Amino acid sequence: MTATDLSRRTLLRLAGGALVLGAWPALAATGARVYSAATDHQNRHFLCCWSEGQLRFQVPSPGRGHDVILHRPSNSSVFFARRPGRWMLILDADSGAVKAHIHAREGRHFYGHGTFVRKGRYLITAENDYANGGQGVLGVYDCADGFKRLDEMPSGGVGPHQLVTLPDDQTLAVANGGILTLPNAEREMLNLDSMQPSLCYVNSDSGQLLGEYRPPHHQLSLRHLDVNDQGQITIGAQFEGPSKQIHPLLFQHRGEDQLQALSAEPPVWQTHRHYIASVACAGDRVIATSPRGNCISIWQRGEFRALQKLNDVAGAAFNTQSREFMTSNGRGQLVTLGKTSLQLNGRVSNLKWDNHMDITT
Amino acid sequence: MQGLHKVIALSILTSLLGACGKPPQQAMLEDTGREVILPLHERFLSESLTLSQQAQQFCALAKRDDTDLAAMRGKWLAAMNAWEGIQNIQFGPVTEDNQAWKIQFWPDRKNLIARKTEQFVRRDDAISLPALQKASVVIQGLSAIEYLLYDKPADALVSGVPGHYCEHLSAAAMNLHQVAERLYQGWHPKGENYLARWAQPGEDNLDFPDANASVSAIIETLVYGVERLKRDKLQRPLGLEEGGQPNPYLLEWWRSQQSREAILINLHSLQMLYSAGESVGLADLLAKRGAEELANKITADFDLAISAIASLETSLFQNHSDPAAQEALRELYDVLGRLLSALKREVPSALEITLGFNANDGD
């Protein structure tokens, strides 16, 4: 028995016997792996990898996690603490063995997201400089030197959340949510009247702010985004203003003077209940998840195409091999968006998948 | 003596069988589906058919007068009332391809129903059902018909120069009936049988991986319904929040002045979904799980809410600022607040169910 087999068995036992489900389509066949943070019904937090109908690993987490990104050069999965957490865990992508446990710098906490630049040499994370009143900063870590923190630069706003790297492998697109939170006030929003969310482009080498774009309403908090191979950004918002108002919650940007709202009738936006949890794009296709609206909206070339209902759906990623989008939810389900319907890939009945996921094939 | 033993053994056996019969969750799902959800959809189906038939006759008349219009409005009212009975059911066939949007668009802050209808009828060719189905969802169902029958177009309909209004009316009524048919077929055991999908949870059931998920669907429906009553049907249009200004044009069905009736029907149907009438409902499930007091409190609050709204004698649109109405509305608002908190927190906790994980995240 190999060490991997042993740890896998142990972890499965810890999981209370993950359900091995019948013949699942798509993912089971391709051996794709899903990475996500999760919480069980006893409110214990884990960092997980799922593949072929079962958990590959389920590692206890120091707190509730948020996003995870795959570092291919070192075959690692990097899990981020949910704000205002101060940990980041680098796990072996196969076994889940902890390779590094990084603590936020004094006076900083993580916002739950990060991205790589320069062929994976550097990791850039969204952080809160709460020691100096809550300015958003981007931490720079050297992946080749034990994720040592090298530097930081301004994110261009308050509350930087998700960030992605453009196809030039250098420019960052950062969703600054605009909401000021400070650790001593927990998750309370301190500036709802004066918030200034933005999509900012930042040069990861120089730290120079290359561009800043504001949504049409100052309470449309820009949180999650994805980029396609053409460098087009799709960014999702959470509206913090009067709930009776209806606003577009998704915008695209690639060189225009302003963010371009995606086009849909008011009921489409109403159904999202002011909340986008994840955005994933591939070519001209985009999906957005809304756990409050229990729905996944599907878009193409900037226009609304369809809506699928899935309870408590949040995580979203694109499987580059099967060319399909996949989603996860708080019921432990992993669900692929087929051409016309949703397909259940599997379920871990005692886990609730958290906000984000990543897939490798 | 032996005979007596037999009798005792038999009676123990009988009571055991009774106790183990159907698990209460299973009974609740099956009864609520069969006794409440299906009949409510059947009613919507039949009223929408009557409305559609009436619209064809109405538009076929060479000349129409106020009596014809009143008869037409009567059928619309019946169909609208039937819709209010199922309006809050947030799972099942209604979610497939967003059927609810096609039925009702509300609140309509930008007066889109009037604007889009007027835009749509300004055309050379006739309005067919397919043409309407390609148009905006805002003007496809009950909301558009209300505009046609109770607003400016009503005069044109009886004055004999209806333009394309009658074609729009007729197509919207047909469309409504098609949607109702789709919903009914979707639930019915002889159709797509969503009832079975809901009542037979399991690992390979995408919508309901376990029985808690099926029970949650009813709790979420009740929460959504009560939330909507409190916030959208009372607080916002009547300015009940602190510093709020009333805006009666945000009332549901303000053109026909049916917002009070709609609230009453919502409350009745939510209570039915909660109790399943004489059958096994969520209330009985709570009682079986040792939360009888909570179950009774919710029943009593539904009763209170119903009597508060029923005590109003005139329409909310006209008389919302009348002091007596204000008092009843305040009471209703408070009762709904209590109900909401019980349904959102106490009921899930009594049944050991979590409603939404990512939905409550906020990140």
Image: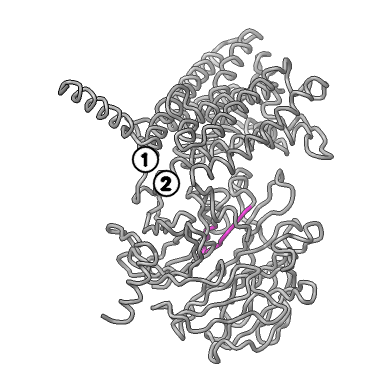
**Residue farthest to the left, as pictured:** B2
Disc 2 + disc 1, Cβ < 8 Å: yes
Q: Which residue is mark 2?
A: B207
Q: Which residue is mark 1?
A: B197
Rendered location of residue B48, percent (x, y): 50, 22
Residue A296 magenta-drawn? no
Rendered location of residue B63, percent (x, y): 61, 10
Residue pictured at 58% horizontal, 85% vertical: A122
Which segment did they paint magenta? A275-288
Q: Chain of mark 1?
A: B
B16 relative to A229, above or below: above
- Crowdedness near tag 1: few (<14), some (14–19) or many (≥20) residues, C-alpha within 10 Å: some
SS assignment at label 2: loop
Q: Splitting the image into 4 quarters, where does residue B6 fall?
A: top left
Numbered label attached to residue B239: none
Residue pictured at 55% horizontal, 68% vertical: A65
* Label whose residue precedes the other's in the sequence (2 or 1): 1
Can residue A41 be spotted in the picture?
yes
Quadrant housing the N terminus of chain B: top left
Q: Chain of mark 2?
A: B
